[in-house]
Amino acid sequence: MRKLWGGVFQSGTSSLADRFGQSIETDLQFWQEDIAASVAHVHMLAKTGILTAGEAKKIEKGLEQIHEEGPEKLPRDVEDIHTAVESRLAELIGETALKLHTGRSRNDQVATDARLYFHNNLLHVLDRIKALQAEIVSQADLHLDDLMPGYTHGQHAQPITLGYWMLAHFWPLQRNGWRLEKAAALSNYSPLGSAALAGTSLPIDRFLTSRELGFSAPIPSALDATSDRSWVLDGLHCLALCMIDLSRLCQELALFSGHEYGFVKLSDEVTTGSSIMPQKRNPDFAELIRGRTSQAISYWVNVASMMKGLPLGYNRDTQDDKPPLFASLELVEDSLNLCTQMLAGCDWQAEKMKAAVHGDFSTATDLADGMAMAGIPFRKAHELTGRVVKALINEGKTLEDLDSESLQRLVPEAPASALKNLLPEDSVKARESYGGPGPKAIKEQLIHAQQLLKMAGFAQVL
Ligand code: ARG
């Protein structure tokens, strides 16, 4: 295996040790970031007079050529991407390549590359969050009035509408976008030029490279810069939260598409069949997202336990921070795209949802509210309503059957006005409190979501 050292050694590492220590396969994902960081570094070396303009130009040209050639031309018999790029550079431009590593180390290089990669890939994730939010908003708009049961404890609780349910999934995404933006800002500081751990005696300018690479500033301590991976944990935490929220959406879609609910038919694009039961339409992708959320959570646990008790200074342990980080980014991006596809292809069964609400006593709260409006203390109204529900069940009737005569009979103190919102559609219409499903309140919520969607980035909402 090609190495960047050797002077002090008598023999090479064993082939097992080589294989065990290699990170090249993972590193290839950030080959472009590695080149970008080297280009910024060489610009700085020229500006500070550490390299001549001619030497710097030659190195830069070589790096550009490596970029044009693509990753296929990079050697694989190396430990990592830094070694691969430097070896290829030497093949292309000869001796001058050996000057690129002046005033830096792989320790600051790898930390720089990984931060750049995180930043670049987070942009895709943020973009995908917006796309899913856009799908939610447009679907919600179409289904603002479609009645469906609202659940607590998995039981019919109060009638809501499909648009109302849909929009409830908009806000977790908004919070996740906001959190990820904060994680991106926190990670956006440059380790480059920290060298191994203690800076360098060469007159480098870390502010120059930091600026050129789009970082907010260089990290003030070279020792901290090469050791810190807390930004990886911030990222993994936010990504895991994102998955947790998506898993909840997926769980609902899986339930709603089942025979017992029958609220939605998922499109063929995101449904699989069974090899034995010809009638099956399985929501596999919703299940996979739900299941893989555990991976996103474990990635955080993986890196957190790796970092616990790790002394300052570069430790090889941290080479393994990248597979979980990259995997989490990919998982979240794919899951967001799949959720968008799933929602876009949903065939909602409005009649079925509406039928599920009728006769389910889910407007009992409205009867109690009606009594409370007439001056009966709510606690008492709750109790009286319970009695009405019990009597109706015994008579084989529903709340929709309740007329003023039977109400008079069952609860003499209740006024007929308490019957006002016992039909599910009336119940929904009446719940106009901020954040409720009533027509004005839901329109207000929809407009709020539409405005946030139009903004660049993610404003804090709660
Ligand atoms: N492959 C290493 C990593 O990913 C690069 C830094 C190696 N530094 C060292 N001193 N061995 O962390």
Image (cartoon, rainbow, N blue to C red):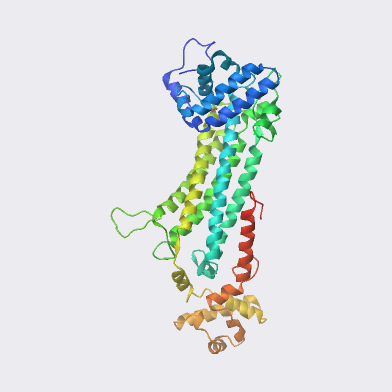
Residue 260 image position (x, y, % from top left): 40, 66
Residue drawn at x 57%, y 88% as measured from the top left: 408
Circle count: 0
124 over 360 or under it: above or below: above
Left or right for 264, reference 168: left
Residue 27 image position (x, y, % from top left): 51, 30
Residue 280 image position (x, y, % from top left): 34, 58
Q: Nearer the viewer, residue 159 or 406?
A: 159
402 over 190 or under it: above or below: below
Screen quadrant of the C terminus: bottom right
Screen quadrant of the N terminus: top left
Look at the image and tell me whether residue 279 can be seen. yes
Q: Nearer the viewer, residue 17 or 32?
A: 32
Residue drawn at x 50%, y 53% as measured from the top left: 340
- Residue 416, image quadrant: bottom right
Residue 398 image position (x, y, % from top left): 48, 80
Look at the image and tell me whether residue 23 can be seen. no
334 over 409 or under it: above or below: above
- Residue 418, image quadrant: bottom right
Residue drawn at x 59%, y 23% as measured from the top left: 60
Ligand 1, seen in the image, is in the quarter at top right
174 over 379 or under it: above or below: above
Q: Nearer the viewer, residue 428 or 365?
A: 428
- Residue 209, image quadrant: top right
Left or right for 227, reference 278: right
Q: Residue furthest left?
A: 276
